Image (cartoon, rainbow, N blue to C red):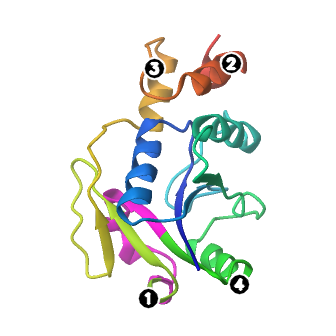
Amino acid sequence: MKKVGILGGTFDPPHYGHLLIANEVLSVLQLDEIRFMPNQEPPHKKKTQSVDNHDRVNMLNLAIEGNSAFKIETIELERTGPSYTIDTIKILNSRDSDDQFYFIIGADMIEYLPKWNKIDELIKLVQFVGVERPNYNHLTEYPIQYVDVPAVDVSSSMIRERLKNGRTIRYLLPDSVIRYIEEKQLYGTK
């Protein structure tokens, strides 16, 4: 049985915070792999309209280059409408029935768990792994395995805002992703 971490997100763009979380969970829980799973339409937040799914997957491929334990899971991009975790996990469990899944969430999502679609059913289907995020409470009644991750206060929205204002994004995400953003003139870059 393979132990597989799932890290979902918009990855718009992917940054070192995502990679650090994935690597720490992989190491601490001794998982076999981490799958980065870009959302189609997250129910809890709006996806930016400026970058299409193809570009987000390309940026993820560049970001995870060189780490054979990091993969991309496009299952949510293959469906339309809101991406509910319960539906995704059911599909993964049936498609990859020999794998054990660990669904990685930040403290911002831990607070939000009571509002998740069919959460009581979902917690029986997958092991949740919680990672700390600054300024969020991680107390919950749900069974969550915690992994301490060094705090890196970087977000995709902060990177997009910095690009919009002509500020540097160096050392916030891999150089290969920065080059891709510049070449494709994403997020208003020229």
Residue identifier under label 4: 94
The span from disc 4 to disc 2 (Cα, nearest Å) is: 39 Å
Residue identifier under label 3: 169
The vertical placement of 182 against 84, above or below, is above
The span from disc 3 to disc 4 (Cα, nearest Å) is: 40 Å
Q: Earlier in the sequence, mark 1 or mark 2?
A: 1
- The magenta segment is 103-122
Q: Nearer the viewer, mark 4 or mark 2?
A: 4
Residue type, label 2 = Gln
The span from disc 1 to disc 3 (Cα, nearest Å) is: 40 Å
Residue drawn where x is 38% and y is 72% of the image? 113
- Image location (x, y in percent) of residue 160: 50, 28
Q: Are marks 3 and 4 in contact (CB under 8 Å)?
A: no
- Image location (x, y in percent) of residue 129: 38, 68
Q: Nearer the viewer, mark 1 or mark 3?
A: 3
Residue identifier under label 2: 185
Is 37 or 175 nearer to us in this picture?
175
Q: Earlier in the sequence, mark 4 or mark 2?
A: 4
The span from disc 3 to disc 2 (Cα, nearest Å) is: 14 Å
The span from disc 1 to disc 2 (Cα, nearest Å) is: 43 Å
Residue type, label 1 = Asp
Which mark identifies residue 120? 1
Q: Quadrant of the C terminus?
A: top right
The vertical placement of 76 against 84, above or below, is above
Q: Earlier in the sequence, mark 1 or mark 4?
A: 4
Q: Is residue 89 left or right of residue 74?
A: left
Dominant secondary structure of the magenta stretch? helix
- Image location (x, y in percent) of residue 43: 55, 63
Q: Earlier in the sequence, mark 3 or mark 2?
A: 3
